[in-house]
Image (tube, rainbow, N blue to C red):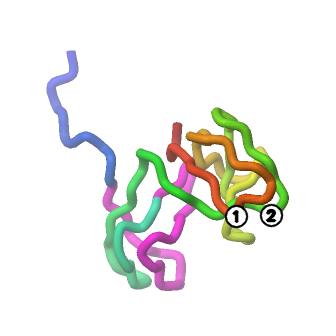
Amino acid sequence: MATGHVQKGDVMPWINDTGSDVAAGDIVAFADMVGLAMGDIADGEAGSLATCEVWELPKEAALAIDQGDQVYWDDSAGEIDKTDTNVAAGKAFAGAPAADATVLVKLNA
């Protein structure tokens, strides 16, 4: 039985070593997951990233996403898509028709 519970894990500490400042609300892709900056994080500084729950994120234009679809973060475009060579972002919490600019994503689901 595990006895060393540390925390729930909704938010994780992160050191910004990207070479650029990260603004509150920005998606940070690392390893094979994403986090959402909970506040501004200057380059070289520590901050907090949300790693779960549902967030409204920008999505690729003209892309229809069905509820439950696995979605990915295109770091260069700064948007959600369905391209599995990008970093897995989570599951679509609700469908988003092609005309929508955003999609609800349950992070890292």
Q: Which mark is residue 61?
A: 2
Q: State the extent of the magenta-drawn residues as a range.
A: 12-35
Q: Is residue 18 left or right of residue 64?
A: left
Looking at the image, tell me whether mark 1 or mark 2 is earlier in sequence order. 2
Three-letter amino acid code at disc 1?
A: Ala
Please state the horizontal and vertical placement of residue 31, each as a whole percent of the image: 56, 52
Q: Which mark is residue 42?
A: none
Is residue 17 located in the magenta-colored stretch of the structure? Answer: yes
User: Could you tell me how far apart the alpha carbons at marks 1 and 2 are, in whole angstroms?
Assistant: 6 Å
Image point (56%, 40%), residue name: 93
Furthest residue in direction left, as rendered:
3
Q: Given contact means CB atoms under 8 Å apart, are the residues at marks 1 and 2 in contact?
A: yes
Please state the horizontal and vertical placement of residue 44, each as a whole percent of the image: 39, 81
Is residue 22 located in the magenta-colored stretch of the structure? Answer: yes
46 w.r.t. 61: above or below = below
Where, by quadrant of the figure, is residue 5 drawn?
Answer: top left
Circle 1 is placed at which residue position?
A: 101
